[in-house]
Image: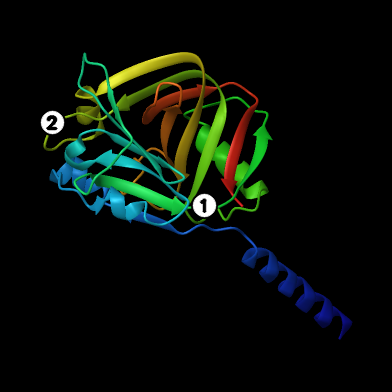
């Protein structure tokens, strides 16, 4: 009888731990596969509607693949650029501003930890997952995250390709691109093991945008190296 009670207690404790894991509902508008391979360019959601909910964070691409979107606590930044030209920044939106692809979540409070490990594009997914789990995140479900630190290298772009169809490489070739070295900046992103070709590419579990607040500019990350230590924030 004592053994039965003991195992029942362990079972209930395990169930309780699983239930206490943190998960954050996300909203997905559009799909990468339809954009890249079916030529979808029509907007899927109005940005005005998206930020009607408090504490909204998000990232994505503008209607027509005409620029990148970042949303930080309901503050929208849209950057548009053509090759060889200086990018433009837009912070005020209208009913005409729509996203082609957008992933959002509502996060009222964040928790933060220091990560004492240098990472690159090949290791960052795993390091984010492990440390998010240490903070109680259920990594089997999508979750948003913020990274702050000294970035050894950031290779990023602002989408501006007029190409109707084609894979990631084709769109990247037609986009405005920049490589930065030794820059202090911020990253906002989403982690998911179940949304490849939806909002992550087939080689990664993360979709990340770098943010340079002093320049009022942001864009999609293609490659990165981060020196240790750096700060990781996930929902509380």
Image position, residue 3 (x, y; %): 85, 79
The residue identified by callout 1 is: 107
Choose between 58 and 17: the one closer to the eye: 58
Image position, residue 115 (x, y; %): 65, 32
Residue 162, numbered label: 2
Image position, residue 151 (x, y; %): 52, 21
Choose between 76 and 177: the one closer to the eye: 76
Choose between 54 and 171: the one closer to the eye: 54
Q: Are marks 2 and 1 in contact (CB under 8 Å)?
A: no
Mark 1: secondary structure: loop
Residue depicted at 41% across the width and 57% down the height: 53
Image position, residue 35 (x, y; %): 20, 44
Q: Quadrant of residue 200?
A: top left
Residue 214 placement, left or right of 37: right
Q: Which of marks 1 and 2 precedes in the sequence?
A: 1
Residue 83, numbered label: none
The relative height of residue 119 versus residue 104 in the rendered view (above or below) is above
Residue 17 placement, left or right of 106: right
Residue depicted at 51% across the width and 57% down the height: 24
Q: Quadrant of residue 157?
A: top left
């Amino acid at each position: 009888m004592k053994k039965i009670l003991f195992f029942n207690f362990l079972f209930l404790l395990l169930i309780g731990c699983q239930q206490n894991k943190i998960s954050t509902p996300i909203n997905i508008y559009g799909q990468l596969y339809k954009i890249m391979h079916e030529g979808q360019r029509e907007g899927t959601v109005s940005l005005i509607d998206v930020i009607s909910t408090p504490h909204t964070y998000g990232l994505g691409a503008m209607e027509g693949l005409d620029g990148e979107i970042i949303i930080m606590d309901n503050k929208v930044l849209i950057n548009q650029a053509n090759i060889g030209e200086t990018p433009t920044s837009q912070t005020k939106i209208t009913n005409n501003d729509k996203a082609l692809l957008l992933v959002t979540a509502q996060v009222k409070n964040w928790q933060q930890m220091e990560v004492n490990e240098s990472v690159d594009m090949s290791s960052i997914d795993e390091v984010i997952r492990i440390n998010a789990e240490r903070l109680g995140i259920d990594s089997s479900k999508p979750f948003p995250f913020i990274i702050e630190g000294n970035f050894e290298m950031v290779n990023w772009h602002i989408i501006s390709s007029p190409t109707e169809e084609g894979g990631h490489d084709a769109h990247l070739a037609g986009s405005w691109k920049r490589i930065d070295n030794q820059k202090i900046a911020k990253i906002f992103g989403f982690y998911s093991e179940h949304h490849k070709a939806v909002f992550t590419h087939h080689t990664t579990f993360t979709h990340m945008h770098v943010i340079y607040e002093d320049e009022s500019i942001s864009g999609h990350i293609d490659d990165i190296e981060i020196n240790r230590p750096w700060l990781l924030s996930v929902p509380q």
